[in-house]
Amino acid sequence: MNDCMNEAVYPSLRDRVVVVTGGGSGIGAEEVAQFAAQGARVAFLDIAREPAQALVARIAAAGHPEPLFCHCDLTDIAALRAAIAEIGRRLGPVTVLVNNAANDQRHKWEDVTPEYWDERQAVNLRHQFFAIQAVAPMMKDAGGGSIVNFGSVSWHVGQGGMPAYTTAKAAVEGLTRGMARDLGPDNIRVNCVVPGWIMTERQINLWLTPEAEANLIRSQCLKRKLVPADVARMVLWLAADDSRMCTSQLFVVDAGRI
């Protein structure tokens, strides 16, 4: 969790109702913290209770508005719809949606079953559309809004070892372009953030070997590791009025890897 003292402050984000999916840990937790530090009314959805509740406590202890945690399995679309409706009732109309949640589980193409394929699409793609569908009427009634979908650099660099994931993340970019066209007349912007390899605790623990780190730094123009705050600051800008004429675009935060 970073303090905003040395970073941009966006007055348009104060009191804005923001929903972050997968906000209990990793990049999502940083986004929740950064929005709270801007004075936004933040709600986040996550399936893991313990880290989510710890995040709420840390943000409150820092003196920022306490975010609303909604326990939700995003593969359960009825539960997702109900959670977003409850957020609207409790905080007001949602005008920022960050479709952050995903899981980059590795898998061999030979082992993929139809059931596993469908489950990976549900985890990484399907909920993004249905979250948009749930918030769009609120945004329309409020006069507009900003939707930020999360893609991935993985398929851009031709990464193997997880074809269901890379397929889903490639599809997010198509979803972004199509929904930006459909929702634009209602002043709803839809953009896609494409993160590089972000050093979350999960990534460090599972995959950051010395060899992998050396290969990563060699492939980047900027020779520093990316951290969650690097992505969160881009998301803040896309949610704020400063980016009011930006829609249907990809914003790559990867230190110049692709």
Image (tube, rainbow, N blue to C red):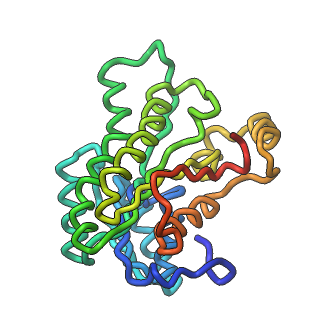
Residue drawn where x is 20% and y is 53% of the image? 79
From the viewer's perspective, tell me whether residue 133 is left or right of residue 175. Answer: left
Q: Is residue 92 visible?
A: yes
Q: How many marks?
A: 0
Quarter the C terminus occupies? top right
Find residue 138 and report its horizontal and vertical position in percent: 23, 67
Look at the picture and state if 109 lies above or below 81. Answer: above
From the viewer's perspective, tell me whether residue 23 is left or right of residue 225. Answer: left
Find residue 191 and report its horizontal and vertical position in percent: 46, 54
Residue drawn where x is 56% and y is 48% of the image? 194
Q: Residue furthest front?
A: 185
Look at the picture and state if 208 lies above or below 19. Answer: above
From the viewer's perspective, tell me whether residue 16 is left or right of residue 83. Answer: right
Quarter the N terminus occupies? bottom right
Look at the picture and state if 16 lies above or below 160. Answer: below
Find residue 115 and report its horizontal and vertical position in percent: 30, 23
Look at the picture and state if 241 lies above or below 183. Answer: below
